Image (tube, helix red, strand yellow):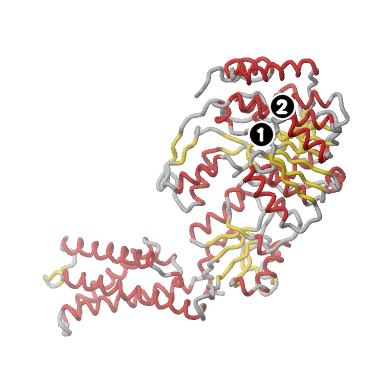
Amino acid sequence: MFLAQIRWLRLLQIVLDIGLICLSLFLAFYLRFDGSIELKYLNELSRVLPIVIVLQITGNFFFGIYRRLWRYTGLTEIMELGLSVLATSTLLMLVRVSGLLIYHNEQLSYAIILIYALLVSAFMSTPRIIRRLQIEHLQRRHWRQPFRKRALVVGAGDAGQLVIKELEQRQDLGVDIVGIVDDDPQKLKKKVGRAVVIGNTQKLKFLIETYQVDQVVIAMPSASSDQIRAIIDICRDCEVETKILPGLFELINGKVSVNQLREVSLEDLLGREPVKLDIDSIANYIENRCVLVTGAGGSIGSELSRQILNYEPATILLLGKGENSIFSIYEELKLRPSRVKIIPLIADIRDTQRMYNIFESYRPNVVFHAAAHKHVYLMEVNVVEAVSNNILGSYNVAKLAKDFKVETFVLVSSDKAVNPTSIMGGSKRIAEMVIQQINQSCDTKFVAVRFGNVLASRGSVIPVWKNQIANGGPVTVTHKDAIRYFMLIPEAVQLIIQAGALSNGSGEIFVLDMGKPVKILDLAYDLIKFSGLRPDKDIKIEFTGLKPGEKLYEELLTRAEGLQKTLNEKILVGSPKPFSETEINQHLELLKIYCIENNETQIREYFSKIIEGSLINKNPG
């Protein structure tokens, strides 16, 4: 252990390099003087040698030579060595020109410096290349056999123990566990399987370098975003691969497997706590029922379909307007072992007759209404489409749910419906008003679930940034102070399903706990770093200004709605606000007329009359 503490492998490399530097300089003198070195030049050699050693080793440290693993020596490592030698030789040339290398009135020969540079480059590269070839020879008995990776597992809890056990049993994965890292002092030096807890996360960088680690596996499903961020920053500095076990809310079936290990992603930095679900209450309203999911091909709709399948309904109706997206989720779900009948339906929620035929044919018991246009700026320049789809289409589905005595209707809403400043937000707010009004005169439980942005959903900023990074930048950010609430798609969907079980039939608006708001600029910086690049250096950040309809920050409730806790700590409920049937019907009739007339100006003015908020009254197109 003492040798490990003094990093004996790194010291061995430095000692070997010093020996090669000495040999290179001696041979440079030997070749320069044709194999016969006079005594005075041997004395000169002895005086110059310590200077060359100090300069060369310092150069090696500066160019990161001793942070590299020899087993991965390649063109990059050889180039770094070459730069180190070039810098040292150039410095020696400058010192020689300045007259500081005079011995007995004679200067150090330029030829010696040049010969030394060539020799030391070759000599220091050789053992590194030999080590790479040796590893390939030992670990590749034939060309198909993969490299074996030396892995460090972070986390000695239940999840960590299961991952370690499976990695030890699955030799075909090519991973050898060299140790475990855990911050619990009680676990230090304890064994898990054949691996030992060798330190805590504060010593992670030291352990990676000492044990020549290739891969770090984070097996802490409930770790905070700060913990994960600290670990991946260290791994990035050490240039090692990082894998992570998904958060607990992603492990729906409760099983942990190395097959679930994946690359660390931006989602892991949100710091979301695991979701606690009341499985019995969810099963009570979904199990053996016919469940209709509108917008089933979208980010939320497809995840709803995946998770609903776990509660074993009798039938899932996958409804959407886009045939490709519905085909994709249908093909995915039908491969899962399940007795649930899965039916793909291509339909537009605005087509009243088509929707009527679907309700009459299948008689759904539960409806999750996720079909909507959600892109703020696009709806600002497509006002009629936003109204006809998000409001009139939602009314069609809700009215049919009432007529066919659906048990539970869940509207997927948005935080942008609060004091809306955009057409999209306004359309979602009126859709909420519609279902609250319908709820007053029927047995169907109508409920709206309001939440903020879901990370990496279709149409979100993350795919846009990824494309910008792939094209060399710049990454565009609306405003340096813009903040948003973010959550992950699986978490949002679990809470949507849970909210349906919490409804008491009063037309509630449930609000998901979005945690802490995230600064958009910080999110952009993190994504650039995940791409292995440096913000403002490799990739520039460009501020574009807020687009029409966008807010600097989002809200989750209006002042009039209030806020109450539910049985689930992550779901809050706002008091429903009553609306008369006559009033809502008048609104809908006028909006239909404005849509037919394509009167965007009138729609904007009318929105400002019937909802709270300050909508932009001019066309941004």
Looking at this view, name the residue that lies furthest to the left.
105
Residue at (72, 49) in percent of width and height: 306
270 left or right of 313?
left
Depicted 292 relative to depicted 443: above or below: below
Q: Kindly identify which numbered label has been placed on residue 431.
A: 2
Depicted 571 relative to depicted 330: above or below: above
Depicted 127 relative to depicted 406: above or below: below
Q: Secondary structure at mark 2?
A: helix
> Which quarter of the rendered picture does the N terminus lie within?
bottom right
Q: Is residue 91 or residue 326 the one in the foreground?
A: 326
What is the spatial separation of the Cα atoms under label 2 and label 1, in whole angstroms? 10 Å
111 left or right of 132?
left
| First along the sequence among labels 2 and 1 | 1
Q: Is residue 8 or residue 2 the one in the foreground?
A: 8
Residue 382 lies in quadrant: top right
Q: Position of residue 122 (x, y in %)?
A: 30, 74
Residue at (57, 16) in percent of width and height: 601
423 left or right of 222?
left
Q: Kindly identify which numbered label has been placed on residue 83.
A: none
Q: Position of residue 559 (x, y in %)?
A: 72, 23
Mark 1 Cα within 10 Å, few/some/many (few <14, many 20+)?
A: many
Q: Secondary structure at mark 1?
A: loop
Amino acid type, mark 1 = Ala
Amino acid type, mark 2 = Ala
Q: Position of residue 2 (x, y in %)?
A: 54, 74
Q: Is residue 131 or residue 170 the one in the foreground?
A: 170
**CB of mark 2 within 8 Å of CB of mark 1?**
yes
Residue at (48, 61) in percent of width and height: 239
Residue wearing tag 1: 372
Q: Position of residue 589 (x, y in %)?
A: 71, 17
Mark 2 Cα within 10 Å, few/some/many (few <14, many 20+)?
A: many
